[in-house]
Amino acid sequence: MNTIVTFEPCSRSKGDPEFIAFSLKKEMQVRFFNRVSLWRWAVAEFDPTVFGLRVNEQSLYTPNGKVPIRLSYETNITEVLIFYERKLDEAIRTDITEYAVAAGCNVEILSHEYLISNEIEAVNCLNMLSYIIKHREVLTDRSLEQCVRILRGCDVTVQEAVSVLAMDFRDAAGSIFFEAVRRGLINLPDVKKMMITGRTKFNVGGIPVG
């Protein structure tokens, strides 16, 4: 039997939790059946090089069993398939590795260690997403261009920037600001190392990616 990827929904196993979120890259609601995948997804949402995001939509059939693909996406360089370690024995792990080599893609096998080593970045991304989706109806290219134009050259904190943007965008100022971060228009240098607060510094720049 050859190892192949199929497009089919991944179901929730009995006893697994369920987390529901809104994906801005997919413009639809998505579901996760473990916290590790949820956190990894949040980081992918903030990677402007990621496109073609899929959440629990594929499975890998191998000679040693079927494996749910919890997340997958593409970049300009490669395709990435992300699995959750539970119930993956050594034979299936070998099948996954051999498939990645043959297909020329990258794979990640997530464990609970991810929750420890990536907590700051993931929580930052989840918090920013919670702001963005509150007013996602105003997140147009025009409003983002205006945001960047207002903040360009400013040496201020996140709190000060949102206050400035509120003059034009009112309650949607935080949504606009963090969506600009998500698209790579505004850079928060320490997002992986420090929790974002109102005192966090930022800079405007980067290549806009939808």
Image (cartoon, rainbow, N blue to C red):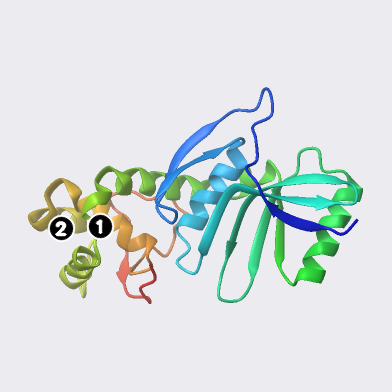
Does 81 sit above or below residue 142?
A: above
- The x and y percentages for residue 90 are 90, 48
Front residue of 119/36: it is: 36
Nearer the observer: mark 2 or 1; the answer is 1
Q: Amino acid at mark 1?
A: Leu
**Upstream in the sequence, badge 2 or badge 1?**
1
Q: Quadrant of residue 184?
A: bottom left
- In this figure, which residue is indicated by the disc labeled 2? 165
| Quadrant of the drawing holding the N terminus | bottom right
Vertical side of 38 occupied by 4: above or below: below
- For label 1, the crowd category at 10 Å Cα-Cα, with few meaning under 14, some 14 to 19 and many 20 or more, is some
Residue 201 appears in the picture as rendered? no
150 left or right of 24?
left
In the figure, 198 relative to 75: above or below? above
Residue 101, disc: none
What residue is pinned by disc 1? 139
Q: Amino acid at mark 2?
A: Leu
Mark 2 and mark 1: Cα distance apart in space: 13 Å
Q: How dense is the environment of label 2, judged by Cα within 10 Å: few (below 14), some, or many (20 and up)?
A: many
For the C terminus, give its image quadrant.
Answer: bottom left
